[in-house]
């Protein structure tokens, strides 16, 4: 979900690579990223600018003070109740730390093997938890999609998919209202879906190579069987994602 409701996110990680990767995702999704490279910087930033932080994304392994030290400080200092925290880790298996993290009341956990769409799913679930629009009817997944537009064949990728449509990631210019013929297959489903769709909305063009450039497609030709297969796939994908995140 790309938003105009911009949030301020404090990104705490000692890895420049992951700070850059996540900040690119956040900025393209419409948010502002602020940075800390160790636990002491996190604590000092919160002391200075607590009212400007909508979400803390916290790595567990950092120098000087690690993620657990930050969580303990938040708990003791009384800031935790109104400070949503999404923990990221590349050093621990989720099941190893899940119970320990729950005592700190963190909002979520994800590994550093995330894709852009998975990261945004986890972030938006926290930032927009009270909004009426639910994220639980679409699976954040990247799969190849062939699409025919005006008799010409192109290839793109999904960023998410539901039983009613998908987000098509492509740098090909597509106009709202365009009619497409779409072909794709889903992991673990022995079937090729050949569907018709209508472009409902598009992202602004000119950001070639961006994570979220593309179009929102609504399916117009699914059968009951196809709808059922897509619903089951989305449900199982989201359950797997939740089991591997928190």
Image (tube, rainbow, N blue to C red):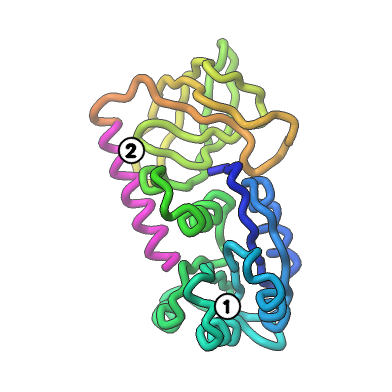
Q: Name the image quarter holding residue 218.
A: top left
Give yes or no for residue 245 being in the magenta stretch. Answer: yes
Picture quarter with the C terminus: bottom left
- Name the magenta segment's main secondary structure: helix
Residue 5, given in percent of the width and then of the height, sits at 58, 46
Residue 183, given in percent of the width and then of the height, sits at 45, 27
Task: Indicate left or right for 137 with 60 as reference.
Answer: left
What is the crowding at mark 1: few (fewer than 14 residues within 10 Å), some, or many (at least 20)?
few
**Residue for point 24% across, 28% down:** 224
Give yes or no for residue 164 being in the magenta stretch. Answer: no
Q: Is residue 71 above or below residue 179?
A: below
Q: Nearer the viewer, residue 87 or 152?
A: 87
Q: Which mark is residue 59?
A: none
- The residues colored magenta run 227-246
Pointer 1 residue: 91
Pointer 2 residue: 230
């Amino acid at each position: 979900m790309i938003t105009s409701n911009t949030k301020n996110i404090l990104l705490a990680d000692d890895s420049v690579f992951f700070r850059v990767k996540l900040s690119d995702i956040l900025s393209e999704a419409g948010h502002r990223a602020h940075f800390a490279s160790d636990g002491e910087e996190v604590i000092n930033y919160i002391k200075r600018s607590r009212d400007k932080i909508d979400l803390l994304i916290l790595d567990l392994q950092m120098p000087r003070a690690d993620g657990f030290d930050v969580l303990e400080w938040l708990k003791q200092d009384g800031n935790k109740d109104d400070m949503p925290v999404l923990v990221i880790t590349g050093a621990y298996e989720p099941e190893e730390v899940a119970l320990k993290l729950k005592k700190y009341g963190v909002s979520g956990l994800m590994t550093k093997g995330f894709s852009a769409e998975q990261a945004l799913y986890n972030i938006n679930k926290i930032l927009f938890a009270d909004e009426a629009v639910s994220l639980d009817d679409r699976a954040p997944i990247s799969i190849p999609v062939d699409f025919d537009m005006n008799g010409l064949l192109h290839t793109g990728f999904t960023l998410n998919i539901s039983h009613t449509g998908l987000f098509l990631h492509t740098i090909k210019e597509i106009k709202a209202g365009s009619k497409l013929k779409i072909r794709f297959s889903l992991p673990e489903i022995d079937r090729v879906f050949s569907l018709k769709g209508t472009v409902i909305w598009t992202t602004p063009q000119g950001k070639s190579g961006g994570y979220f450039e593309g179009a929102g497609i609504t399916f117009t030709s699914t059968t009951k069987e196809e709808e059922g297969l897509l619903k089951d796939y989305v449900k199982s994908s989201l359950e797997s994602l939740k089991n591997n995140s928190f």
